[in-house]
Amino acid sequence: LAGESPDNYPEIRATLDLWGFNSYTDYLYNVCELGFLEGLIPVLEIGSLTSESLESLLEIVGGVKLMLDSVQAQAYHEVYPSSPGKHIEKRLKMLQLLGKEGATAFTGLMVGIGESLSHRKDVLSVIAKLHKSFGHIHEVTIQNFVPQKGTAFADRKAATHKEMLKTVELAFEILPEDVLINVPIHTVESPMDFIDLGVRDLGTVPFGQYVVEAPNSPSIDQTIHDIKEAG
């Protein structure tokens, strides 16, 4: 719900009132400030914000992450029936606002949720255009869809390794050289193939109960060994 105006949900609004926060933005600011005081640099991932909320939060965060997990218009309601905040137009406006505010932005796209290769190409081209205008895109994540048990997409087919490699190749062709391309280490079956393409960022090291992992993904130790072996 974080990307869908949480203040509008009665249960969340009641919790914010109980905790003494005027808005969800105030709550986020407080959490980010606590992290900052502990020596961390918060990066916010919350979906679209108003310009007023963004201006406030940029006082305390080091960057904003906004994924463009989008599909063509005809497939939108099948993939995101209850998520108006996922509309590509709305997210691109937010990415543009980040540029105008001089905020460091982290973005990317999901591969295999119903979008076409040409749609991915269009999204990457728009990201490149925004970066050329504002110079604010730090990183673009190319993440493959991995079906998970107990979710609405449990039976959906996963993105193939070939689809991922082709999309990463497109990203290198389209994106400016100063934009990092990230491929999450825990969702792909052969990280070395992406390193061979030129990827130098394999994302964060995942941990915890709700980590999405591909069935054939090698362990982190194995990947580290393979990287050392490759020199």
Image (cartoon, rainbow, N blue to C red):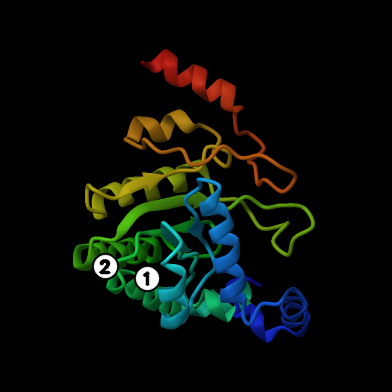
Task: Name which residue type carries label 2.
Answer: Leu
Extreme-front residue of the structure: 37
Report the residue at 44% width, 80% height from top: 90
Count of numbered circles in the view: 2
Secondary structure beneath disc 2? Answer: helix
Classify residue 204 as left or right of residue 174: right
Classify residue 178 as left or right of residue 84: left
Secondary structure beneath disc 1? Answer: helix
Q: Are marks 1 and 2 in contact (CB under 8 Å)?
A: yes
Task: Name which residue type carries label 1.
Answer: Leu
Residue 33, relative to residue 11: is it above or below? above
Q: Give residue 25's mark.
A: none
Report the residue at 48% width, 19% height from top: 226
Foreground: 85 or 60? 60
Report the residue at 51% width, 53% height from top: 36
In this figure, which residue is indicated by the disc labeled 2? 130
The C terminus: image quadrant: top left
**Label 1: few (<14), some (14–19) or many (≥20) C-alpha neighbours in 10 Å:** many
In this figure, which residue is indicated by the disc labeled 1? 95
Residue 188, relative to residue 9: is it above or below? above
Foreground: 228 or 74? 228
| Rendered image quadrant of residue 102 | bottom left
Percent of width and height locating residue 26:
58, 74
> Who comes first in sequence, dot 1 or dot 2?
1
Extreme-left residue of the structure: 132
Percent of width and height locating residue 23:
62, 80
**Label 2: few (<14), some (14–19) or many (≥20) C-alpha neighbours in 10 Å:** some
Percent of width and height locating residue 29:
55, 68
Classify residue 156 as left or right of residue 61: right
The N terminus: image quadrant: bottom right
Distance between the Cα atoms at labels 1 and 2?
8 Å
